């Protein structure tokens, strides 16, 4: 979506009672054996970060060291970004996140990646027929983390060509749940915010192609739709105009003087933004730059910013077991608090009914903001109608540390589970982190928590209603009484809450089971990695969100929405409706103002090679041969040709002779950014009306 008009001052409920505080007085002494000796030094070595406090929001890991980061980088220039599109509704949250998922796949070398369908995510993130889900319709604004549930529950993404943005029928959407199967399912995401180190955010972009972020997109702070800087930290909440985008690069030396609309930042440096306001809105293809010093970029008031970091391929070999299908709308951290029991070992459990065919456990995905805590994954058999409280009955599957806040994927050697009902438990122990840090100056307590699909409201109006019921989720708190409790009973008894919530714990299984059926959980060799949506029903799509802050918040994230568009209408890809040439004037774009990394290349798929001529090179009358669109004359049509054309248009480098002839794709006598766009359409398989890649022979 574009902007947020009339932003709601949304309040999320939190109902800690005196009864809870009174009973949480014991101290946990049970540790995960393989993680009990881990210290902050090891944690920092693994993540590159000292844990941030919960009031600082979401920390990000550092996959590379600071020394490895260049001063400028662009995933677009690397050929890992699909073309900019234009949103026609309040769906920036879908465009931004799906674009980042496209980029992650391209970075990993996945082939034939096509643009994903924001409108499909928009329908999914609306109120369901049974009254559950996000209490919005497709014309309302949304939240930047709705697509996290969409992607982690494997209802999407689907391709734009299969579900175009023009789709307005809920019946068509319901039918799509039966006919459209996503090819990839998200399994991990890293949360962060404006307090996270800048180099940490850069590292996420460098390693995963992009991050998803939000900012106050009031256009009075934008210069020519190319440079954006708002330095005003005092803007009232109801005046913020939230907008979600994909951040695909940075430039530490981007001139601060380029930001002229409303003040100038103190220092150079900016993020490269892939927007969704049409590629024709400015001279750099719909991208723009936002200053490092912008007051609202990555601010937690809009919800978490995040990087999509891991996924699995979906086919008919695997299955996703889940109870919530909505992702995390909150953090279940009711059981511990600094004033009562500062740390604990709590096991959160989801009960699943594993079939004979789908019971080879491959991965477990869960959401948590207990950064730095130890966690252990267990298989827990049932004792009667609920998970066993005797830990001797449990099978330990995996043990590690929560090295980032967000969605965590525990990937371990496959385990064959017993068929029938059993629980997957996530035991989180934050004792070591607390003891090592709580006396440090500036340390903020990080509670023991698990992501929960829990209802949200704004005054008297519901924002989200979960699919929650008894018998789905349980927990056992060793600092309390070590008894297994039904989560819905807990909500009812201690919070006077009939709606409740469901833990975000998901199990991914393989369906390759040997003939000898075990009676207990046993290890097996690795099987193929893949995924398949679980029991997709037309009345149960699955929205998501995640807690905007780790501590008890008083307000929910501001929705990103708008009622108007400042944009031009994006032209059709047809020959007869191509836009007027947009060659950059030499006086308005000096060479020094556009470094190489600031010329984004709007690629969409791995480059394809042009077809070689069959017999032309043997013809003695042929003086020269070239391929239409082959600007660098290397006999291939790829993103390098588009980059060269853009540099030529910006007068960074100049082409001459046969290069100019090859690059003038539409034959209009000039080489400009429109020719580069045509190459991108060719690579993406969108359009090839100008015979790009065809050989042309110059005869004597």
Image (tube, rainbow, N blue to C red):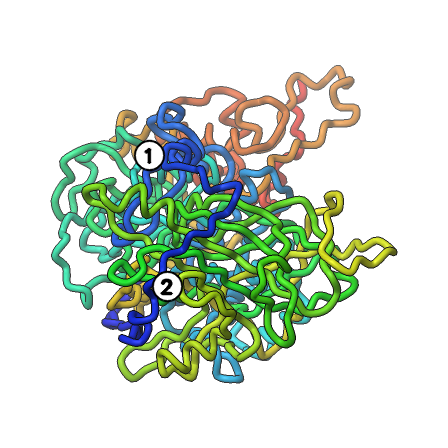
Name the mark nearer the viewer: 1 or 2.
Answer: 2
Residue at 36%, 74% in the rendered image: 456
| Residue 209, percent from left and from top | 46, 40
Tell me the quadrant of the picture where the N terminus can be found. Answer: bottom left
Q: Is residue 301 above or below residue 554?
A: above
Residue where numbered disc 1 is placed: 199
| Residue 555, percent from left and from top | 26, 68
Q: In this view of the protein, can residue 142 be seen by the observer?
A: yes
| Residue 375, percent from left and from top | 49, 50
Q: Taking 395 as reference, is 489 left or right?
A: left
| Residue 163, percent from left and from top | 58, 65
Residue at 41%, 43% in the rendered image: 581
Tell me the quadrant of the picture where the C terminus can be found. Answer: top right
Residue where numbered disc 2 is placed: 333
Q: In this view of the protein, can residue 223 be seen by the observer?
A: no
Q: Secondary structure at mark 1?
A: helix
Disc 1 packing (10 Å; few <14; some 14–19; many ≥20): some
Q: Secondary structure at mark 2?
A: loop
Which of the numbered marks, if any, corresponds to residue 469?
none
Q: Taking 367 as reference, is 548 left or right?
A: left
Is residue 556 or residue 165 the one in the foreground? Answer: 556
Residue at 64%, 61% in the rendered image: 320
Q: Is residue 52 above or below residue 40?
A: below
- Quadrant hosting residue 304: bottom left
Q: Taking 357 as reference, is 258 left or right?
A: left
Q: Are marks 1 and 2 in contact (CB under 8 Å)?
A: no
Q: Taking 177 as reference, is 648 left or right?
A: left
Is residue 528 or residue 476 the one in the foreground? Answer: 476
């Amino acid at each position: 979506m574009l902007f947020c008009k009339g932003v709601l001052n949304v309040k999320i409920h939190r109902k800690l009672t005196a009864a809870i505080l009174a009973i949480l007085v014991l101290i946990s002494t049970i540790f995960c054996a393989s993680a009990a000796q881990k210290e902050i030094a090891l944690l920092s070595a693994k993540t590159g970060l000292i844990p941030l406090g919960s009031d600082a929001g979401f920390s990000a890991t550092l996959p590379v060291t600071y020394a490895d980061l260049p001063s400028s980088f662009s995933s677009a220039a690397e050929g890992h970004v699909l073309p900019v599109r234009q949103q026609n509704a309040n769906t920036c949250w879908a465009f931004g996140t799906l674009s980042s998922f496209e980029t992650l796949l391209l970075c990993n070398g996945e082939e034939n990646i096509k643009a994903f369908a924001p409108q499909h995510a928009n329908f999914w993130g609306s109120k369901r027929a049974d009254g559950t889900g996000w209490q919005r319709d497709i014309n309302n604004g949304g939240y930047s983390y709705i697509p996290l549930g969409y992607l982690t529950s494997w209802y999407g993404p689907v391709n734009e060509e299969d579900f175009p943005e023009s789709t307005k029928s809920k019946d068509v959407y319901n039918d799509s749940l039966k006919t459209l199967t996503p090819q990839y399912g998200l399994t991990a995401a890293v949360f962060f915010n404006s307090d996270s180190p800048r180099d940490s955010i850069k590292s996420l972009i460098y390693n995963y192609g992009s991050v998803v972020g939000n900012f106050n997109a009031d256009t009075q702070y934008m210069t020519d739709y190319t440079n954006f800087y708002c330095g005003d930290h005092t803007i009232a909440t109801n005046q913020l105009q939230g907008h979600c985008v994909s951040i695909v690069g940075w430039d530490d030396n981007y001139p601060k003087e380029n930001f002229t609309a409303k003040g100038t930042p103190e220092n150079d440096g900016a993020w490269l933004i892939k927007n969704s306001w049409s590629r024709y809105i400015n001279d750099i293809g719909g991208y723009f730059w936002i200053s490092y010093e912008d007051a609202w970029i990555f601010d937690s008031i809009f919800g978490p910013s995040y990087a999509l970091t891991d996924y699995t391929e979906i086919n008919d070999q695997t299955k996703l077991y889940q109870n919530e299908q909505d992702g995390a709308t909150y953090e279940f951290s009711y059981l511990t608090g600094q004033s009562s029991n500062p740390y604990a070992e709590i096991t959160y459990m989801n009960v699943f009914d594993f079939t004979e065919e789908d019971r080879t456990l491959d991965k477990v995905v869960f959401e948590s903001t207990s950064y730095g805590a130890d966690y252990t994954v267990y298989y827990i058999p049932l004792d009667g109608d609920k998970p066993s409280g005797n830990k001797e009955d449990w099978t330990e599957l995996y043990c590690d540390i929560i090295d980032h806040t967000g969605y965590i994927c525990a990937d371990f050697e496959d385990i064959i589970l017993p068929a029938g009902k059993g629980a997957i438990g996530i035991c989180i122990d934050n004792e070591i982190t607390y003891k090592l840090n709580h006396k440090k100056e500036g340390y903020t307590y990080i509670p023991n928590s698990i992501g929960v699909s829990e209802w949200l409201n704004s005054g008297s109006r519901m924002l989200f209603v979960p699919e929650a019921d008894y018998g789905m989720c349980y927990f056992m708190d060793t600092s309390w009484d070590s008894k297994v409790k039904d989560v819905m009973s807990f909500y009812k008894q201690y919070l006077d809450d009939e709606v409740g919530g469901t833990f975000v714990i998901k199990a991914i299984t393989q369906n390759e089971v040997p003939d000898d059926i075990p009676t207990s959980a046993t290890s097996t060799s690795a099987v193929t990695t893949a995924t398949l949506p679980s029991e997709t029903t037309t009345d149960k799509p699955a929205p998501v969100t995640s807690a905007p802050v780790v501590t008890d918040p008083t307000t929910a994230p501001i929705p990103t929405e708008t009622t108007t568009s400042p944009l031009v209408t994006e032209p059709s890809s047809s020959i007869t409706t191509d836009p007027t040439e947009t060659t950059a004037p030499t006086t308005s774009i000096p060479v020094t103002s556009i470094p190489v990394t600031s010329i984004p290349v709007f690629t969409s798929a791995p480059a394809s090679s042009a077809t070689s001529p069959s017999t032309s090179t043997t013809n003695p009358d042929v003086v020269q041969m070239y391929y239409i669109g082959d600007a660098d004359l290397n006999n291939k049509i790829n993103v390098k040709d588009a980059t060269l054309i853009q540099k030529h248009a910006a007068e960074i480098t100049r082409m001459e002779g046969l290069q100019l002839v090859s690059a003038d794709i539409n034959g209009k006598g000039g080489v400009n950014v429109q020719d580069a766009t045509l190459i991108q359409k060719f690579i993406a398989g969108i359009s090839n009306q100008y015979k790009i890649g065809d050989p042309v022979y110059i005869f004597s």
